[in-house]
Amino acid sequence: MNTILEQITEWLKEMLATGVMDNLTGLFDSVNTEVGAIASEVGTTPANFSPGVFSLIRNLSESVIMPVAGIILTFICTWELIQLLIEHNNLANFDTWLIFKWILKTFVAVMLISNCFNITMAVFDVAQSVVSSSGSLIMASTAVDDSMLASMEATVSSMELGPLFGLYMQSMVIQLTMSALSVVIFVIVYGRMVEIYLMTSLAPIPFATFGNREQSQIGQNYLRSLIALGFQGFLILVCVGIYAVLIQSVSVSSDIIASLWGIVGYTVLLVFTLFKTGSLAKSVLNAH
């Protein structure tokens, strides 16, 4: 009877050990792929990220949003002319140079709204240059090496049935956690680019407000938000650099689960800091 129980126990131990190693094999592949792709993704300009989407956004901006911005610009320029004429004692002290001043301001406003898409792309070209330059300085690997599995296998095989079952359950939780984190990293990086496309599609409207002193706050805040989006890529890259240093300092000890949860903890920290990069960039540039 004891022999049968021992055989069942050994069978269960072998099955659980195999299950643990299956869960741990390739555990960090998805996260390694997403983190490794961050540098190239955030360093890509909107035009190169997805040429098809970029073309769609540009067509919508120029054919749908531009006429609306033209109406707003017409109203603002008319109001600006009225303000210039009446601010000097209701035309009692009228100077002809005011007309030339209005013509110059209107010309500048028309030029801005006509080239708003080129201006917004110039912002991201500058940001992309900064990201590319900083990317070359972050040389540490962000990959979690699977070579530790060989040393883990011997430790797993020598464990008793109870601890082995607990290890199996925790390895399943860690596997699900890492898969979820890789999806979150993907959403953050690609969500930033979608936000850039959405912001640039409406570019003509805030640019139309630069012709008036009071309403120009809208355009100024929009421009600050664009710069914040561009330099968010730099902050993302800094987060990846910090993660690379931290993840390479993790050493796998005999306590396998503690080591694995340590790696998961650093990855969760990376995701948290990636979420904060957008609000941090906007707060630095006073954009809202």
Image: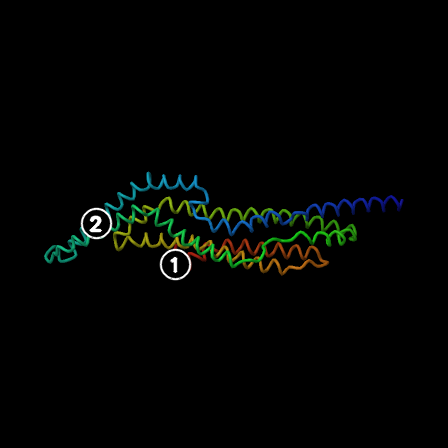
Residue 166 screen position, x and y as percent: 72, 51
The image's colour scheme reads: rainbow
Q: Residues under labels 1 and 2: Cα distance?
A: 28 Å
Query: Along the horizontal axis of the image, is 241 left or right of 48?
Result: right
- Name the residue rendered at 56%, 51% in the picture: 36
Query: Along the horizontal axis of the image, is 141 left or right of 68?
Result: right
Read off the residue under disc 2. Answer: 79
Q: In the depicted view, which residue is nearer to us: 155 or 148?
A: 148
Read off the residue under disc 1. Answer: 286
- Would you call the spot at circle 2 few (<14 residues within 10 Å), some (14-19), or many (20 or more)? few
Q: Amino acid at mark 2?
A: Trp
Q: Quadrant of the N terminus?
A: top right
Name the element at disc 1: loop
Name the element at disc 2: helix
Q: How many marks?
A: 2
Residue 135 screen position, x and y as percent: 50, 56
Q: In the depicted view, which residue is nearer to us: 213 or 141?
A: 141
Identify the mark nearer the N-term, 1 or 2: 2
Image vertical order of residue 249 relative to residue 103, above or below:
below
Residue 122 screen position, x and y as percent: 37, 51
Residue 190 screen position, x and y as percent: 49, 46
Q: Amino acid at mark 1?
A: Asn
Q: Quadrant of the C terminus?
A: bottom left
Query: Along the horizontal axis of the image, is 255 left or right of 228?
Result: right
Indicate which disc residue 257 carries. Answer: none
Rendering quarter of residue 155? bottom right
- Asked if the residue under mark 2 is in contact with the one under mark 1, i.e. CB atoms within 8 Å, the reply is no
- Name the residue rendered at 61%, 56% in the picture: 265
Q: In the depicted view, which residue is nearer to us: 268 or 109?
A: 109
Image vertical order of residue 188 relative to residue 258, above or below:
above
